Image (cartoon, helix red, strand yellow):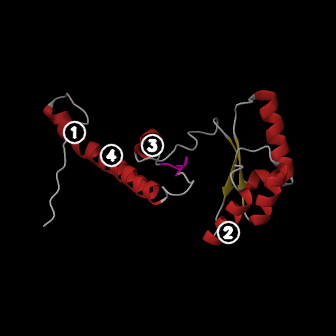
Amino acid sequence: MVTSCVTAKKLFVAEATVHTILQCERLILNCMQRMSGIATLTRQYVDRLQRYKTRILDTRKTTPNFRLLEKEAVRIGGGLNHRFGLFDMMLLKDNHIDFAGSLEAAIEKASTYRQTHQPQLKIEVETRNIEEVRRVLAIGKVDRIMLDNFTPRQVAEALSLIGERF
């Protein structure tokens, strides 16, 4: 026989007319369930990765008008918030790299901008393959390397190259 004891906690207090409370009740419960699900799934991933030097980061790709709540749910679940908006980190994606002409040119332009305008701004670069990881390692000047669509084997190879530099 399995028994469990759940301690109830008061999450919030709502004061309104009975009609208003009844109109909003389902919406509030649905939102709470969604955020609880995000926090719970994040916690499961965090727990599975605990023995590694790996962190779960969220994305800006959130439900419209729910970014703040969903990012908080990730944080509550033990994950880290990656970026809230386009303003708090430079992310060099494949289209930026292609537009700049090369990975090296994109990193150089981002680094120059950071030095000139916002020295505290982090730079993350998206890599599509092991060769791009090698090139980023040779260039430096970034804070994070994203391994985009890598297989588990490619992730292992990239991590062996990167070590603890990024």
Residue position marked by numbered label 1 in the rendering:
9
* For marks 2 and 4 on the same chain, the one whose residue lies earlier in the sequence: 4
Q: Amino acid at mark 4?
A: Cys
Q: Secondary structure at mark 1?
A: loop
Q: Position of residue 44 (x, y in %)?
A: 40, 57
Q: Amino acid at mark 2?
A: Gln
- Picture mark count: 4
* For marks 3 and 4 on the same chain, the one whose residue lies earlier in the sequence: 4
**Residues packed near mark 4 inside 10 Å, few (<14), some (14 to 19) or many (20 plus):** some
The answer for how far apart the CA atoms under marks 4 and 1 are is: 17 Å
* For marks 2 and 3 on the same chain, the one whose residue lies earlier in the sequence: 3
The answer for how far apart the CA atoms under marks 2 and 4 are is: 37 Å
Image height check: is 9 above or below 163?
above
* For marks 3 and 1 on the same chain, the one whose residue lies earlier in the sequence: 1
Image height check: is 15 above or below 55?
above
Residue 11 lies left or right of residue 119; in this view the side is left
Q: Amino acid at mark 1?
A: Lys
* For marks 4 and 1 on the same chain, the one whose residue lies earlier in the sequence: 1
